[in-house]
Amino acid sequence: MLLVVGVYVVAGNLVNGVGKGSVGLAKGAVPGAYKTLVQRWGNLCPAINPALLAAQLYQESGWDPDVVSHADARGIAQFIPSTWATHGIDGDGDGDRDIWDPNDAIPSAASYDCELAKYVKDVPGDTTNNMLAAYNAGAYRVIKAGGVPAISETQNYVKTIRTLEKSFAAPVTRVDPSKQAAGAIYYAQKKLGTLYLWGGDGTAEDGGRFDCSGLTKAAYASVGITLPRVANDQWNAGPHPDRDELLPGDLVFFSDDLTNSRAIRHVGIYVGGGYMIDAPRTGAVIRFDPIDTPDYFGATRVTEDGAKALPTTV
């Protein structure tokens, strides 16, 4: 009861303007409908930040507020009803606690994280890592182990969320170059002149043809990095350099909604000089195209860890 009351006190402080942290979100990384919620509630306690909360929500639901898992986890934060009964809060102050409403579920995810952080605050090591481990394996196991327990699923969960966190955070320093970039460009260059095929992966069955994300996926697969199939998930495969920091090999993205990475509809591979190699559309061939267009969304510097962290389905 005291924990629940404490959460409501902090929630009141948030409404009154407290909780403005220093971690920014990458442009468009969080859908516009949820950005304010994530930025505000991601600063609920020192163990979390907006980028980390965003990484958890993306990992759990892919920002789908209506999804139900095979284990009956529900909504954008994927609460099981029994957990929701104990930890769900009325985040928007409308008098109810609705597991399906992101205005309740996102604040509840943040408050649950912060409760777990309190449970493991005296455990040696990084508090955030211990909190994430408690989220996956339970606080008792973390306390008993004196840190992240030697459970592969739990260790992988902690690494996954901390890696995805970098994809949702606005970079504060220059992003390191990709080691595999040159090989990915080399692969794409060999496909110049190939006719576009919607849904094409470049297989024999596809006649060696690609669509935009099929080309980028195959280019990075050629250097040992597995990307998701669709462009809006490839966005999360690493941190996001600014336009004036682009390097050859960066993935560049385009959207009709510049506030929402889930609306991304096109991707190419940057080659320098303001140009990319891309598979543009039906009837066209893989070619060089300029990137400085009104629908330019941003860029991702693909990392091996970033690609491995992406969920297989979102």
Image (cartoon, rainbow, N blue to C red):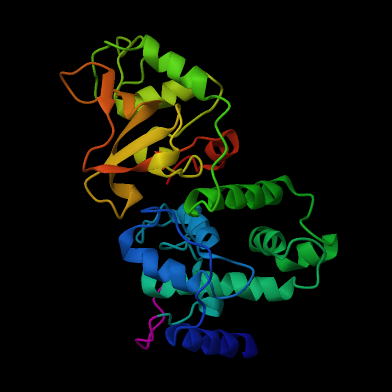
Place of residue 201 in the rendered image (x, y in percent of width and height, measured from the top left) = 36, 20
Quarter of the image for the N terminus: give it.
bottom right
Place of residue 121 in the rendered image (x, y in percent of width and height, measured from the top left) = 75, 72
Q: Is residue 249 left or right of residue 178?
A: left
234 vs 27: above or below: above
Residue ID at (69%, 63%): 134
Where, by quadrant of the figure, is residue 273 drawn? top left
* Residue closest to the eye, 81 or 113: 113
Place of residue 72 in the rendered image (x, y in percent of width and height, measured from the top left) = 47, 60
Residue 94 lies in magenta, yes or no?
A: yes
* Residue closest to the eye, 127 or 153: 127
Q: Which residues are magenta?
A: 92-100
Q: Is residue 200 left or right of residue 167?
A: left
Where, by quadrant of the figure, is residue 292 drawn? top left
Residue ID at (67%, 63%): 128
Place of residue 66 in the rendered image (x, y in percent of width and height, measured from the top left) = 34, 60
**Residue 270 visible at all:** yes
Residue 110 lies in magenta, yes or no?
A: no
Residue ID at (54%, 85%): 10
**Residue 70 visible at all:** no
Magenta region's main secondary structure? Answer: loop
